[in-house]
Structures are given as structure tokens and as C-alpha cells.
Image (cartoon, helix red, strand yellow):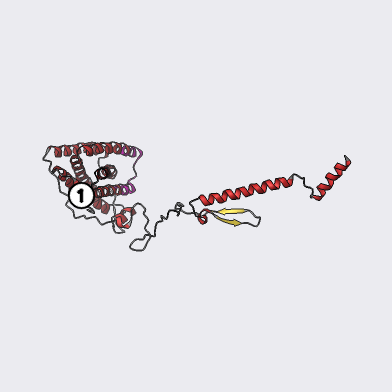
Amino acid sequence: MNYLLTRSAIRCVVAGGKSSRWPLDDVSVARGEGLGVLVGHWRRRMSTVPEHAAAPEKEKKESGEVVVKEEKSDQPKVSSYWGISKGKIVREDGSEWPWNCFMPYDTYQSNTSIDLTKHHEPKVFLDKVAFRTVKILRIPTDIFFQRRYGCRAMMLETVAAVPGMVGGMLLHLRSLRKFQLSGGWIKALLEEAENERMHLMTMVELVQPKWYERLLVLTVQGVFFNAFFVLYMLSPKLAHRIVGYLEEEAIHSYTEYLKDINSGAIENVPAPAIAIDYWRLPKDATLKDVIIVIRADEAHHRDVNHFASDIHFQGKELREAPAPLGYH
């Protein structure tokens, strides 16, 4: 017994006071660290993020503690693995282009000399139906908004951006289904929808809608989209005629908007930056300049939709007539 105790004491002294279990624990730790290294290496190999982008910068302090320094940036960190990157885009004056929703080649100068007084006289039955429908829809709008033309324009643009999208989508599906070219009408109608959406984005910068107006937008858009979808499936000529008359009402609304600006009832505030870049307006442009170019856009949309309806009334398809691409 004394021999065993003496032997154990000598072994502890030789091992530096450590128990014989420690070497096994060291081996386990080493194996665990090795497995961790292998797992980390495997994850790096399988990741789509480059190693130099995935590994944050590390700084060692005197105490040996490692501190991870993350770069702060307003732009989201996106993997460059797919080869998609935004090049440097500048304005004509050399300043950086600030918008991702549209590029410089999407901008234009609106033709404000267009005839605003054009009107399609309803003669046949469907024309009269379209005209009366639009007049009836105007009644609740006049009652709700009265002369609050900023909020009125916001609601109007929410509705006006729907027909081009619905028409373009249905023509797109028809082209795929029948293996036919569209004559450029898909692009023309989608351009109209995008232009109307930019009107809305501009008006939102000028008018802060209240919660009940946002709720009204959701309701009206949901109802109008589905109703117009069914209408376009049943009668494209009636659908385009209704849009043409809606655009005529839009011209009237923006004309009244301008009257209130000129009279001082509505303050002629500076134009939003998005409007200045989109319509290539001067740097000192005002709300009046914005309303003038938007009204001109509505006049062009009026012409396009009445033209499309006339094509259908002649018993032809839209693809048989060249689309008015780039008609601003």
C-alpha cells in the first residue's frame, strides 16, 4: 500500500503536479479544435461570398483579445459572386446619379405644347357607356376631395397606373399563347404604367397621405384592378375608351390644380428632386412646373388610349398598327 502511494506521488511530481487524466483531455481538445477548423474550412468553400468579403477585419490588442471591426455602410452588402454590380452613373454635370428606380436613359423632357382641349365625342353605344361611367366615378371623388388637389392627384395616379399594367400583361400573355408579335404595344402600355407610377412617387413627395387615405388607396386599387382586368378580357375597346376619358378628367383636375397655384391658394413649393431628374427640369423648378409636365403626360396617355380604342372599333387588333413608343 505504501509502495503504491509512493509511486503515485513520484508520478505527480514528474508530471508537474498534473493528473494522468490531463493528457487525454488535451488530446480531446486538440481533436475538437481540429474538427472546428475543418468545419470552418468547409463552410468557407461552400459559401458564395468571397473570403475577403466574408472575413471582417480583426485587430489584436495588447492583452491578446481579438476585436472584430465591421465596416459601416448605408448600402446593403451583396455578394459579388453573380457578377452583378452597379456601375458608376453620373449626371451631365458629373454628380453621382442618386436613383435606383430609374436611370438617366429613362428621363425625358415632356412635350408641354400638346393640345389639352382634345375630346372624343361619344357617338356609338359603347362610347356613351364609357363616358357616363367616368362621369359617375367622378362624383364621389369630387365629394371626398373637393379642392384638395394634392390628395386628389395621389388617388388619381393610384388608379391611372393600373390600366397600362393590366393591358400590357394580357397582351404579353396573348403574345406567348398565340406566338404573335405585339407590334410594340406591350412595351407602350407598360411604359404608360411606369410613367403613371412615377407621377404617384412624385405626388407622395409633395403630399403626406393620412391613414384613412392610404386605406382608401388599398380599397380602390384592389377593386379597380380586378374590375378592369375582367373588362379588358371582355371588351378591350371599351376598356381603352374608359381610360381615354379618365385621362381627360385627369387633365381637367391638373388644370384646376394649376389655377389654385396661380391664385396662391396652394403654395408653389420647390419641385422634388425626383421630379427634377425624371423630367429634366431646371434646378429651380417649382410645383407649378411639375404639374405642367404631369398634365402633358396625361394628354399623351389620352391620345394613346383613344387611338387604341379606335383600332379595336375598326375590327382590328392592336398589333396591326404600330405602337406609339416613346410618345411623351
Viewed as shown, does residue 313 lie left or right of 77?
Answer: left
**Image spot of residue 241 (x, y percent):** 18, 42
Q: Residue 204 magenta-drawn?
A: yes
- Seen at 65% across and 47% down, the residue is 31
**Image spot of residue 196 (x, y percent):** 27, 47
Front one among 225 and 206: 225
> Is residue 183 in view?
yes
Amino acid found under the numbered disc labelled 1: Ala
Asked which quadrant contains residue 95, the reply is bottom left
- Seen at 36% across and 58% down, the residue is 97
Q: In this rendering, is residue 184 above or below 155?
A: below
**Image spot of residue 235 (x, y percent):** 19, 38
Front one among 204 and 162: 162
Asked which quadrant contains residue 276, the reply is bottom left
Q: Main secondary structure of the magenta part?
A: helix
Viewed as shown, does residue 31 lie left or right of 184?
Answer: right
> Is residue 148 in view?
no
Q: Residue 277 magenta-drawn?
A: no
Front one among 286 and 52: 52
**Image spot of residue 254 (x, y percent):** 23, 47
- Seen at 21% across and 43% down, the residue is 243
Residues packed near mark 1 inside 10 Å, few (<14), some (14 to 19) or many (20 plus): many
User: Mark 1 — residue?
Assistant: 299
The part of the chain drawn in magenta is 199-217
Q: In this rendering, is residue 160 above or below 282?
A: above
